[in-house]
Image: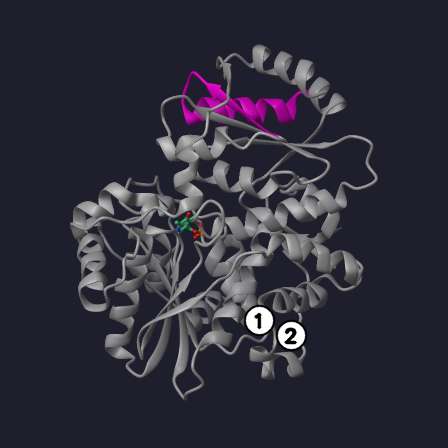
């Protein structure tokens, strides 16, 4: 398997390098040079395959011979170890629940698979791989759970003290084993600056094998293609066209859907659903992409003003002529945006009509699908439910006026004891700690 940088199609690299490095030196994004169609006997008999078998077929086709079959099976067994069930709302609307992993959000799929691949590619190295992550809450939880007890890896998380929710903090600070949480007396930006400086520090990179668990690592995107096939497999076989509706922020999830389409997923159309941060819906309408600072909303995991995966979306639809990238994109994707007031109404509507508790991100998806289906009835729409509603407990309970159950895997964390290393925002102290405790 070969990968190129979205900023330079000539500079090719291999999967191991792309996974361990995360980002190309030119600040582009790694993309597979070829996204082959999956074998037709697989596509025609999807329902005969388990979720793990689907994942295996995709990796095998994409990776070619990079990883031997038995190793690949072991990686997938450890990475894809929770389900992605489809729930029916009515004949036209379905929900794909992506929150059955340890941190209750779809990012668990990407984080677990990345952990397994990094650990695999680090085998035979004498030094363990140290993953540095700065988090404002959610990403750190998914990464920590994904790497927990993964051989040859250690995760060092920096988070701003007092600025994450109680349960988020417990997700970062109670796991133990190979996960260490540094509680920084500063902001998320301070944490991020410390991590960035660590990567630039020659002494640190000479003594510690450092890597980042960046959200745009290609190994986080690949496993997100698995569940599009897994969802398709569970839909009833009728004559309706299938439409996937993706609540989007950085557009990794939608990009994975476009890759699945390229691999032969028989999907008719995609819907990009956003909150007030609507630069992609605006592009789909106008052909003009104008990133701008993000604004805060209720569906805060989608508060992104300059989505990095847009470069990958463009690459997947690149046309030969001027303007044709936009046309190609319009033939496959429509965008809709909704404000917080509409999101609250959508959330309440789903509960009233279907007795289903959806989270604010999924509610944005529901509204977008509803709008699309006004002009395209008789389609089969699948909304990607990206997080469990209990992650947004206060807001959801206030809107619905009902109690929302917190899944036990999250609730038990509340009882666990928090363990952190207090840290100032001074880089020298952080560096000293790394050299004394990690090197
Ligand atoms: C990260 C996240 C999103 C946005 O996903 P992208 O792949 O960045 O578009 C949507 N919903 C939830 C709950 C998330 O955590």
Q: Is residue 8 magenta?
A: no
Give me the disc on residue 415: none
Quick check: 205 above or below 350?
Answer: above
Residue visible at 39% across and 51% down?
387
Residue linked to disc 2: 37
Image coordinates for residue 397, horizontal then vertical, percent: 21, 47
Quick check: 191 above or below 135?
Answer: above
Q: Does dot 2 land on a helix, a strand or a loop?
A: loop
Q: Is residue 239 left or right of residue 437?
A: left
Give me the disc on residue 262: 1
Tell whether label 2 touches label 1 (CB within 8 Å). yes
Q: Does dot 1 land on a helix, a strand or a loop?
A: helix
Which is nearer the eye, 364 or 372?
Answer: 364
Q: CA distance from mark 1 to mark 2?
A: 7 Å
Residue visible at 74% across and 46% down?
120
Colour convention of the picture: one colour
């Amino acid at each position: 398997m070969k990968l190129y940088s979205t900023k330079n199609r000539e500079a090719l690299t291999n999967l191991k390098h792309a996974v361990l490095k995360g980002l190309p030196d030119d600040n582009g994004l790694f993309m597979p040079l070829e996204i082959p169609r999956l074998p037709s006997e697989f596509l025609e008999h999807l329902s005969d395959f388990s979720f793990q078998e689907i994942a295996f077929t995709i990796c095998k086709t994409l990776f070619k011979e990079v990883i031997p079959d038995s190793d690949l099976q072991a990686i997938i067994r450890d990475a894809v170890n929770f389900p992605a069930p489809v729930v029916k709302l009515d004949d036209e609307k379905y929900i794909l629940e992506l929150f059955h992993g340890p941190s209750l959000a779809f990012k668990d799929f990407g984080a677990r698979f990345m952990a397994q691949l990094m650990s695999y590619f680090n085998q035979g190295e004498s030094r363990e791989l140290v993953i540095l992550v700065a988090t404002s809450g959610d990403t750190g939880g998914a990464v920590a759970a994904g790497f927990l007890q993964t051989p040859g890896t250690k995760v060092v998380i920096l988070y701003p003290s007092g600025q994450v929710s109680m349960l988020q903090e417990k997700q970062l600070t109670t796991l133990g084993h190979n996960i260490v949480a540094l509680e920084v007396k500063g902001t998320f930006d301070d944490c991020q600056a410390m991590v960035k400086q660590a990567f630039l520090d020659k002494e640190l990179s000479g003594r510690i094998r450092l890597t980042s668990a960046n959200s745009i690592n290609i190994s986080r995107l690949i496993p997100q293609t698995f569940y599009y096939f897994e969802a398709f497999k569970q839909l009833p076989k009728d004559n309706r066209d299938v439409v996937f509706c993706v609540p989007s922020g950085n557009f990794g999830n939608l990009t994975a859907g476009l890759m699945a389409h390229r691999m032969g997923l028989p999907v008719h159309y995609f819907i990009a659903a956003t909150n007030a941060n609507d630069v992609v819906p605006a592009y789909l309408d106008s052909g003009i992409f104008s990133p701008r600072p993000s604004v805060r909303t209720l569906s805060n995991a989608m508060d992104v003003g300059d989505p990095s995966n847009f470069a990958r979306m463009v690459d997947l639809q690149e046309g030969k002529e001027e303007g044709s990238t936009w046309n190609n994109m319009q033939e496959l994707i429509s965008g809709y945006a909704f404000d917080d007031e509409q999101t609250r109404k959508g959330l309440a509507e789903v509960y009233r009509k279907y007795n289903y508790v959806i989270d604010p991100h999924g509610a944005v998806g529901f509204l977008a699908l509803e709008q699309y289906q006004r002009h395209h009835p008789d389609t089969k729409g699948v909304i990607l439910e990206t997080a469990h509603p209990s992650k947004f407990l206060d807001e959801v309970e206030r809107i619905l006026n009902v109690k929302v159950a917190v899944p036990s895997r999250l609730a038990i964390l509340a009882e666990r004891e928090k363990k952190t290393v207090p840290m100032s925002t001074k880089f020298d102290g952080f560096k000293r700690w790394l050299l004394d405790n990690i090197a």
